[in-house]
Each structure stands twice: as C-alpha cells, then as structure tokens.
C-alpha cells in the first residue's frame, strides 16, 4: 500500500490501509453488556430489542448467522429471497425448508449499526488513485460500483415498500469540505483519475469557497455528491421483517432470532450423524449461555468482534476492533446536506425531523478519532466508555467547520454522546467468503464470514451480504458461485493479499 496512507485520517472507504500503531495481544472480548446509549437505540425505535431472548432456544438449524447488524440481517434477507426464488434447495434429496437462525449477543442491532453516524453515502471517486495503486483499476472501479449498487438498492427498497419516511430517509447529498490545499489537490486528482477510468462522475459538483460560504456557512471550497441519511436501526428492522415475510410466504425457509444470546464457542461435531430428515449434515455446535445449537453452516457477521470466535483473525492482518464516537447536539443548521472533510475523518448531518417544541434541530456529528492520541482507539472493543479527547474535538467540530452558522452547545441537556466499535482491516476492505485459517485451511469447513468494513459499512454491507448469501446457496446446491460483477475481487477471502 502507498506510504501516504496514514492511520490518523483513515476513516473513509477508499482510503488507505490503517496500520495499527502497535499490535495488541489482549484477546477481543464479547460485546460488553453496559454499552453507552446511542440515540438510534431508543427503546421505542427497537421493537425487536429483546426478541427471542427468553423461552425455548432453537437447537437445530441449517444456517446460523451470528450478529444482528446490517450484515447479518441483510444476509438473512438475501438468503430467504434466494431460496424462495430457486424453490429452496429442491435439487438436494430430502430437502426441507431451510432453518435459519440469527443469534445476537446483546439487544437487536446494538453493535456498530445501531451506533453509527447515520450516513448512506456512496463514494463516487474519492481516493481512487490510492485504491488503484493498492488493488488495480478494475477493483477500484468495482469498489465504487459496490457502493453505488448498495446505496441505490436500499433507497429503492425503502421507497418501493413505503418506508422512506418511517426511517427518516433524506436525500440531501454530502458536502465534502476541502479544508487544506492538499485535500483540494487530492480530490481533483482522484476525480480526474476516476473519470479517465470510465467512472460516471457526472453527479459530482465542485463548489467555490464563496458559494460554500454563502450556502453552507463554511469558509472552504468543497465538492458535493449525492447521498442519503437515515435511521440505520429502523432500516435493519425493516429488512428483518421482510425476510420473515419471505420465509413464511415461500415456505422454502424459516427464520428465527435470538437476542441476548452470545455465541461463546464453536466446536466441530465429530460424527456426521445427521438425522435422515435433514439434507445437510450438522457440522458445528455453537455454545451459548442458554444452551447449544447444532448447525450445518455458519455465517460470522460479527464485524469488530470476529476474532473472539475466530482467533486467527486477531491482529494486524485480521479484523481490528476500533472505537468510534458520535455526538448528537442541538444547534441551528439551515441546510439538509450532510458534511465531512475530504478524508472523512470528521462528518455530520442535521436530523430531518424538526422539533415541535421550538428547540433547535439535532445535528449528529462523528469521527475525530485522530484526536485520540497514540493508538487511535484501535484494539479498543469496549463501547461502554469514550475517549475524552475525541469528545472534546467533536464538541468543537461544528463551530470549526461552520463558524458563521453554529455555536457549540452549552447545555448538557442538549447533548448525547456514545461510542461504537468498528472493524478495521489492513486492506481497509471487507472479508467476504469462506473462513480460511492459513495454518489449518480445512478447519472451518462450512463457516463463512462477511466483516471488516473499516468504518464504512452502510454502503457495503448489504451488497457483501448478498454476495455471501449467493456463495452459501451455491455451495448448498453444489453449484459454482457466480461472483457479482460489482464485488471487488480482493474482498474475497481466498484472494486477499494478506495471509488471513
Ligand atoms: C461510531 C461509528 C460511526 C460510523 N459511521 C458510519 C457512517 O456514517 N456510515 C457508514 O457507512 N458506516 C459507518 N460506520 C460503520 C458501520 O456502522 C459498520 O460498518 C456497519 O454497521 C457494520 O455492520 P455489521 O452488521 O457488520 O456489524 P455490527 O453492526 O457491529 O453487528 C455485529 C453484531 O454481532 C454481534 N456479535 C458479536 N459477537 C457476537 C457473538 N459471539 N455472539 C453473538 N453476537 C455477536 C454484536 O453484538 C453486533 O450486534 C460507523 C461505525 C461506528 C462504530
């Protein structure tokens, strides 16, 4: 990877490899029980919070998905649809409706998806030159195609199912403030390189400093791209309900959810003594404090926590838990657009819903991890706490970017702050495919992974989950996986450059 890549500003997707400051040997824990309270995880917004947390535990399944964030639930959504479209796995003798379960350590969707910045903003050309240097032009173009595909699929789905308002979807676009000459030069070079490679950049607009000052109140030149903001938990809840509906309508699968059911270990089932009624041998036992579950196939959708169950993913070439912070503050911002600096290291957007009581709108801001000091919050998997230096930088962010429009909020009543754990990788990109431990390549047969979005998953997870669902169904039916054109090939686990 290019030497210009630095961990300090490694926040956006096409951005350079975050090299951990120092490898940390302490093992990654399960998600902590006493996490900070995210605005998005308001109990009224989370009807599935405790779903399946009491009562009988599902004990035998074909597919077990671990994790109920946007990856795990999108995978369930795509699996149920694929099975319904293909008439289940009717090619397999004794095929029954496929039993799928989602297991979640805490409340529904309470990981990164329930704690993020609320942006659904695909890249158009950003960091194209670095990406080409790292992965070649074809995959750089695919990386953009993946994000465009995911963002438009989610937006189309929300509109076609009448949920756009229910999830507070706003098509305000994003203003990237070019806060230094270096950012301005890199943005222009990336734009020209992507255009020359055939990427459609026609929706992008460069804005002069005067125009930005007048329109947004920020004293910088900028560029604007289309993009959306939304309430991530509500989108994931909708996807889960759609998946349940598809499973029940098609009768080709069943879908269950058990929250507050952490998987503490996975062990192989030695004898292949599957009951004659199941088409697929049960290969794995998943242990939980509530009992054991036998499964044929497993999908790790655990993102930052992946190495808890897959220790070979601990360390610099695996998935590095990295703590991010978000601040919700009331202030007057008379624009619908989201904003960020070009490197995406600081970002935010005003909530679309205007308070009825005359109070100022809520603005959600995040990032500023570069202020954390050595370590940049990497290998930090505890979202019950926050870094005071990052807090301070987030409080100062709006007056810094928009001195003409925003004052820092002074009333503690107007402020909510929380943290969440992202999963960073050395290639800044996702692991999608069968789990492969290079030291024992056959040890995880039947286990798959889709994780490691490096702080930018909302425009990637839904598509990566679709790709892994296709791969799993292909394996179930002993067919070749027809890899989607938009999936960057270096995301695929057995094609990654790093050893894991
Ligand atoms: C502060 C912050 C701000 C962000 N802002 C943005 C943004 O604005 N835009 C954007 O695109 N991306 C953003 N991201 C990144 C984005 O939120 C993630 O990439 C995405 O949500 C990952 O989804 P996921 O489903 O893979 O992981 P998660 O949502 O983390 O889901 C994984 C789930 O697995 C569960 N789990 C883990 N281990 C176990 C186990 N052993 N047993 C059972 N369950 C387990 C966890 O509890 C968790 O619920 C942000 C992330 C953070 C933390």
Image (cartoon, grey):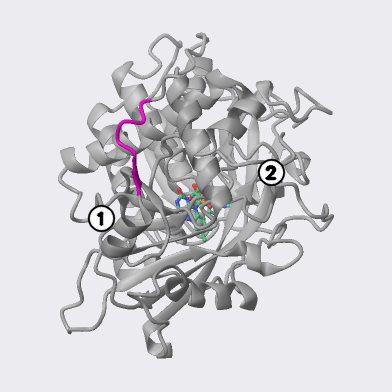
Q: Residue 498 lies in what quarter of the image?
A: top right
Q: SS class of the residue under badge 1?
A: loop
Query: Mark number for residue 4?
Result: none
Query: Mark number for residue 167?
Result: 1
- For disc 1, the neighbor class at 10 Å (few under 14, some 14 to 19, many from 20) is many
Residue 55 location (% of width, % of height)? 44, 58
Give the side of residue 151 with respect to residue 396, left or right: left
For the magenta stretch, what is the residue range? 200-207
Q: SS class of the residue under badge 2?
A: loop
Residue 202 within the magenta-colored segment of the rendering: yes
Distance of mark 1 from mark 2, alpha carbons? 35 Å
**Dominant secondary structure (helix, strand or loop) of the stretch shown in magenta:** loop
Q: Residue 74 lies in what quarter of the image?
A: top left
Q: Residue 232 lies in what quarter of the image?
A: bottom left
User: Which residue is identified by label 2?
Assistant: 5
Q: Residue at x 23, y 43 (%)?
A: 158
Residue 131 location (% of width, % of height)? 59, 31
Residue 431 within the magenta-colored segment of the rendering: no
Residue 450 location (% of width, % of height)? 56, 36
For residue 30, above or below residue 129: below
Q: Residue at x 47, y 29 (%)?
A: 192
- For disc 2, the neighbor class at 10 Å (few under 14, some 14 to 19, many from 20) is some
Mark 1 or mark 2, which has the lower sequence index?
2
């Amino acid at each position: 990877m290019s030497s210009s890549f630095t961990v300090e500003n490694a926040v956006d997707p096409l951005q350079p490899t975050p090299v951990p400051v120092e490898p940390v040997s302490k093992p990654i824990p399960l998600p902590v029980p006493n996490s900070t309270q995210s605005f998005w995880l308001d109990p009224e917004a989370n009807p599935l919070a405790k779903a399946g947390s009491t009562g009988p535990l599902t004990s035998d399944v074909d597919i077990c998905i671990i994790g109920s964030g946007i990856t795990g639930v999108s995978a369930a959504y795509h699996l149920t649809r694929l099975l319904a479209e293909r008439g289940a796995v009717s090619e397999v003798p004794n095929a029954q409706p496929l039993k799928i379960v989602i297991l979640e350590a805490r409340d529904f969707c309470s990981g990164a998806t329930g704690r993020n910045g609320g942006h659904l903003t695909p890249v158009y050309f950003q960091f194209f030159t670095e990406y080409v240097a790292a992965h070649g032009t074809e995959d750089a173009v695919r990386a953009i195609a993946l994000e465009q595909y995911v963002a438009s699929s989610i937006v189309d789905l929300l509109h076609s199912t009448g949920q756009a308002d229910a999830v507070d979807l706003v098509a305000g676009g994003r203003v990237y403030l070019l806060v230094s000459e270096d950012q301005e030069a890199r943005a222009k070079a990336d734009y020209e390189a992507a255009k020359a490679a055939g990427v459609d950049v026609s929706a992008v607009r460069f804005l002069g400093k005067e125009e930005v000052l007048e329109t947004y109140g920020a004293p910088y030149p900028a560029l604007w791209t289309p993009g959306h903001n939304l309430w991530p938990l509500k989108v994931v809840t909708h996807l889960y309900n759609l998946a349940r509906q598809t499973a029940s309508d098609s009768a080709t699968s069943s879908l269950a959810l058990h929250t507050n059911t952490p998987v503490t270990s996975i062990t192989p089932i030695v004898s292949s003594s599957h009951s004659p009624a199941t088409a697929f041998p049960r290969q794995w036992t998943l242990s939980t404090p509530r009992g054991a579950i036998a499964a044929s196939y497993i999908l790790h959708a655990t993102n930052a926590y992946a190495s808890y169950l897959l220790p070979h993913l601990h360390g610099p070439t695996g998935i590095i838990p990295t703590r991010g912070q978000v601040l919700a503050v009331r202030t007057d911002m008379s624009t619908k657009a989201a904003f960020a600096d070009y490197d995406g290291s600081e970002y935010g957007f005003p909530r679309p819903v205007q308070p009825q009581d005359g109070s100022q709108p809520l603005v959600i801001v995040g990032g500023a991890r570069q202020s954390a000091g050595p370590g940049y919050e990497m290998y930090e998997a505890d979202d019950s706490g926050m870094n005071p230096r990052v807090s301070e930088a987030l409080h100062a962010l709006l007056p810094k970017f928009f001195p003409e429009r925003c004052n820092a909020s002074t009333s503690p009543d107007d402020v909510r702050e929380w943290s969440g754990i992202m999963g960073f990788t050395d290639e800044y990109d996702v692991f999608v495919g069968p789990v492969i431990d290079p030291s024992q390549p056959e040890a995880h047969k039947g286990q798959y992974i889709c994780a490691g979005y490096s702080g930018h998953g909302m425009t990637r997870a839904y598509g990566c989950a679709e790709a892994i669902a296709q791969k799993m169904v292909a394996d179930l039916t002993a067919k070749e996986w027809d890899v989607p054109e938009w999936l960057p090939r270096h995301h695929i686990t057995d094609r990654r450059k790093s050893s894991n």
